[in-house]
Image: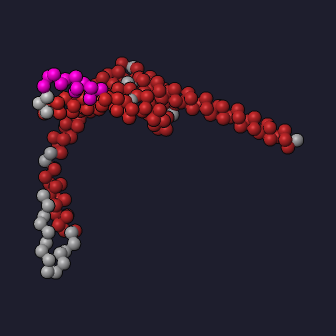
Amino acid sequence: MTRLRALCTAAVLVCASGSVFADQASHNASAEAFLTTVHADKLGTPIYMQVQQMFSQRFEQAKAPESKKATLEGYEAKANAALDSAIGWSKVKPDLIKLYTDNFTETELNDLVKFYTSPLGQKVLQQMPQVTQQSAMLMQQKLDPAVPVVNKLLEDMTKEVAPAPAPGTKPAPAKK
């Protein structure tokens, strides 16, 4: 009888774990659908573009002749391969799926997909990069007048909290 009870318990656990795995697979699929909808596979594009720009600028700074353009392109390809191995879509997709499944329920992810496939959601996807950039520029402009004030406060605090020089020693010159 004890053996039968153990077998029944084991069977229930196996069935329950199958349900958990199915639920997780469905949750993962919802996260993947969301990531596809919001074009998350393009998240790394600005990084690739920035690296390409760095190589082009260095090429120009080196005053390399046009005949060395193939060398530049070879190094750019190697840089792209290095980026692919670090942040390529196949590398980050599992981590992003986990991030979204950890932070959103399956229902929430499905609702997000519905939103982002709506006309308003599509507009948000299209406009948000420019709005984010403009917001950052606005904040920088508003912040500019505060930078010297904060720097002065940091300098004043440093002077106030610095230990007093030992008697008979000359104070260290202030760093700028």
| Figure coloring | secondary structure
Q: Is residue 10 left or right of 49 when viewed as pictured?
A: right
Q: Which residues are magenta?
A: 65-77
Point out residue 40 in the picture as x, y percentages from the top left corner.
38, 27
Which residue is depicted at the point 48% across and 35% down? 98
Image quarter where the N terminus lies is top right
Q: Is residue 144 left or right of 36 when viewed as pictured?
A: left
Q: Is residue 23 left or right of 8 when viewed as pictured?
A: left
Point out residue 146 in the picture as x, y percentages from the top left corner.
16, 50
Give the camera-side residue of 21 and 135. 21
Question: How many marks on residues?
Answer: 0
Point out residue 10 in the picture as x, y percentages from the top left corner.
75, 38
Which residue is depicted at the point 33% across and 25% down? 125
Res. 82 image quadrant? top left
Point out residue 110 in the picture as x, y percentages from the top left corner.
48, 26
Is residue 68 inside the magenta stretch?
yes
Is residue 131 visible in the rendered image? The answer is no
Which residue is depicted at the point 22% across and 22% down? 70
Which residue is depicted at the point 26% across and 32% down? 51
32 shown above or below 13: above
Is residue 22 visible in the rendered image? The answer is yes
Is residue 4 inside the magenta stretch?
no
171 shown above or below 1: below
167 shown above or below 36: below
Give the camera-side residue of 122 and 22. 22
